[in-house]
Image (tube, rainbow, N blue to C red):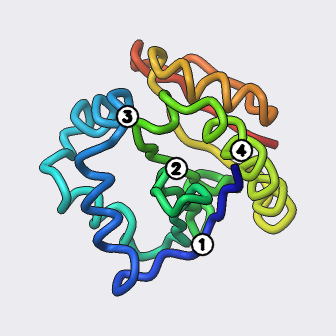
Amino acid sequence: MKTSIVAYNPSYHNKDIEWLSHHLRAMDLLELREKGKWDGIDTLKEAIQHKGYKNYCAYGDDGAMIGVLGISEKPMYEDMYCIWFMGSTAMETSLPIKREFVRRSKQMLETWKAEYGRLFNYVHRENHLIRSWLLSVGATLYDTDCQEYQLFIID
């Protein structure tokens, strides 16, 4: 299993984004809904087309979409750049896909850390898959005033 991560191109990837909107991981949907930002495909398109971010699509070697991810082009808080990821249910149901994505995403994070420096965002406490992944890539988790979310920073 090999994962490819390619720069988002609306004319090429929007069908896959639509597919992903129907196959998002339950925790990613929960995070979007709790922020009042879920109305289906339009929300996902808005997220990946957001100005000021470099966004990417991740695919398995069979061409199936694994998820979407991105990084802010400028620091969003102090000297830190905001990163984000939303994944398909394949991240939870296929161990080979999960392993390969973790391997490939670690490489991408190393590149981002070298280019941008400190990375951050927030993660729901119940998002065990992503919290485990964050810890595996060296993130530090911090409690916040919001009981459901933790701040993560990758130095």
Upstream in the sequence, badge 3 or badge 4?
3
- Compare marks 4 and 2 and give the one earlier in the sequence: 2
What kind of residue is marked 2? Trp
Residue at 28 percent of width and 57 percent of height: 19
Circle nearer the N terminus (4, 1) = 1
Q: Nearer the viewer, mark 3 or mark 4?
A: 4
Of the residues under marks 3 and 2, which one precedes in the sequence?
3
**Residue at image mark 2:** 84
Secondary structure, mark 1, is strand
Tell me the SS state at disc 2.
strand
Q: CA distance from mark 3 to mark 4?
A: 17 Å
C-alpha separation, residue under disc 3 versus residue under disc 2: 14 Å
Where residue 136 sits, quadrant-wise, is: top right
In the picture of the structure, the residue carrying the numbered disc 3 is 25
The answer to whether the residue labelled 3 contacts the one labelled 4, judged by CB atoms less than 8 Å apart, is no
In the depicted structure, whether residue 150 falls above or below residue 68: above
**Residue 144 % position (x, y):** 51, 21
Please name the amino acid that badge 1 sits on: Val
Q: Residue furthest front?
A: 62
Q: Secondary structure at mark 4?
A: helix
Q: Which residue is mark 1?
A: 6
Q: Residue at x 55, y 32 (%)?
A: 94
Q: Amino acid at mark 4?
A: Glu
Q: Is residue 93 above or below residue 65?
A: above
Left or right: residue 12 compared with residue 128: left
Of residues 90 and 134, the one drawn nearer to the viewer in this rendering: 90
Q: Secondary structure at mark 3?
A: loop
Which residue, as the protein is rendered here, is positioned at the far bottom?
Answer: 11
- Residue that label 4 marks: 100
For mark 2, does the 10 Å Cα neighbourhood hold few (<14), some (14 to 19), or many (20 or more) residues? some
Q: In the image, residue 62 lies at what x, y percent? A: 55, 59
